Image (cartoon, helix red, strand yellow):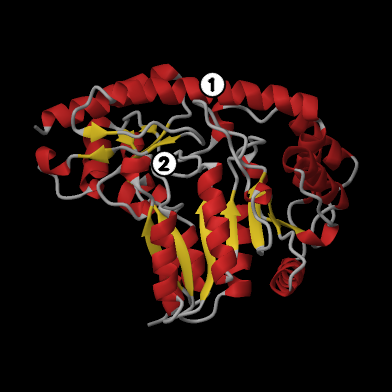
Amino acid sequence: MLLSKRSKYAVNPLEEDDAISSYLERKGKSIIRLNRGDPAVYFPTPEYIKRAYIDAISENKTHYTETRGAEELVAAIMGRYRRAYGLDLNEEDIVVTAGVSEALYMLSSALVDRNDRVIVFKPYYTQYIPYIGLAGGQEYLLDYKENDGWGIDVDELDRHVRKLKHKARIRYVLLTNPNNPTGTVLSRKTLEGIVDLANEHNLLLVSDEIYDEIVFNGARFTSIAQVARGIPYVILNGASKNFDATGFRIGFTIVPGRDKLSKELKAKLADFASVRVSANAPAQYALAEGMNNVIEHNKAIRYMVHEIEERVNFAVKLLDENKYLSTVRPRGAYYIFPKVDLKSLKLKSDKEFVDMLLKTKYVQLTRGSGFGTAGHIRIVSLPPKETLEEAINKLNEFCRSKR
């Protein structure tokens, strides 16, 4: 074998059908792509953030920043979390990364050794598993409860932790809130239960909160920072979603604790940051402006969330007309994750479903099994209503044709 065994983890289900889509487009077909959650395609990055990026370049802020992150951005992150969640941070609690993807890589590299376990709930974001595997660890999968609005059963988590900790070292429990791909927003009560459990079993909690301002349909977001007392925890966030700047590739880790594990972890994350030298410099200064200019940000995020809520609910209403799909209404992010009645459609798998839909109706979705939950599909609800209507009408026609 010429390549490493770990290279097998370098896969991304979100893009696995891109080659088919590109081939069909070269043949003159128009493809509706609902497979990638990139808000900047449909909601241009706010002008004040783009101006800050241009200003940074004009002011020759194109050199390496501090390896932990530009001072301006670190200070802006501290301000945001103080305003939003009452969390007082020090500079050493924060490490700026090249998107949350790099944060995930650094985190698992710092914590996970061979055969260690990481508890992950499925369906999960597709990039979680590769980074655990690349570090030599193994994911331990539990289910979000679809019949309970994709919630977490804390008692079930407790049973599995008790069983698992006698067999392997649990390095952390990974939460995604709001959730990709289901759009779930975890309740404060659920988070408090998870914190109590983590205290009892001495577990590190990692909370991916990249969509923390994109909540709707009456949901209220609670950060792990608001309920985590007495336990070490990590928050992941960045520019991509709330600040509508996916291409900036700026994320960050927050490790607020003063316990031994937290101190060692934040120091090691800083070491990893020094190895790669620096994240994108102009983008860091632009995100700092994005956070500091609260008035402009609030206007931009209010508009985007209002539009996303309208589009998600419009799409769900159309999907509800399809008796072969069952959908839990999302309350955050911008994804819909219907369950497909594959048996009635005489299809073998969700992959066969999305492949046939793409090749016959020219609509590209993502298979639920790519997120760890087979028999589902993920729909990105960012495009305008007329595009969503066309795509879902084609999806419904496809299902009717397979009866």
Q: Is residue 305 above or below residue 67?
A: above
x, y percent for residue 270:
76, 67
Q: Nearer the viewer, residue 341 or 359?
A: 341
Residue under numbered circle 1: 307
Q: Is residue 66 visible?
A: no
Q: Is residue 35 visible?
A: yes
Front one among 257 and 138: 257
Residue located at (19% from left, 28% from top): 323
State the CA–CA distance, disc 2 to disc 1.
Answer: 18 Å
Question: Which of the pair 289/185 is nearer the observer?
Answer: 185
Residue under numbered circle 2: 182
Q: Position of residue 227 (x, y in %)?
A: 64, 50
- Tell me the residue at 69%/73% (across/down): 261
Q: How would you rate the neighbour count of disc 1 (Cα within 10 Å): few for under 14, some for 14-19, many for 20 or more?
A: some
Residue at x 74%, y 70% (from the top left corner): 259
Foreground disc of the pair 2, 1? 2
The picture quadrant where one finds residue 5 is: bottom left
Mark 1: which amino acid? Glu
Q: Mark 2 or 1 closer to N-term?
A: 2
Residue 148, given in percent of the width and then of the height, sits at 35, 42
Badge 2 amino acid: Thr
Please tell me the numbered disc located at residue 347.
none
Residue 202, horizontal then vertical, whole percent: 59, 71
Local SS, label 1: helix
- The structure residue drawn at horizontal position 43% and vertical position 18%, both measured from the top left corner, is 385
Decide if residue 111 is on the left or right side of residue 403. right
Q: Quadrant of the C terminus?
A: top left
Q: Is residue 343 left or right of residue 13?
A: left
Q: Residues within 10 Å of mark 2 (few under 14, many from 20)?
A: many
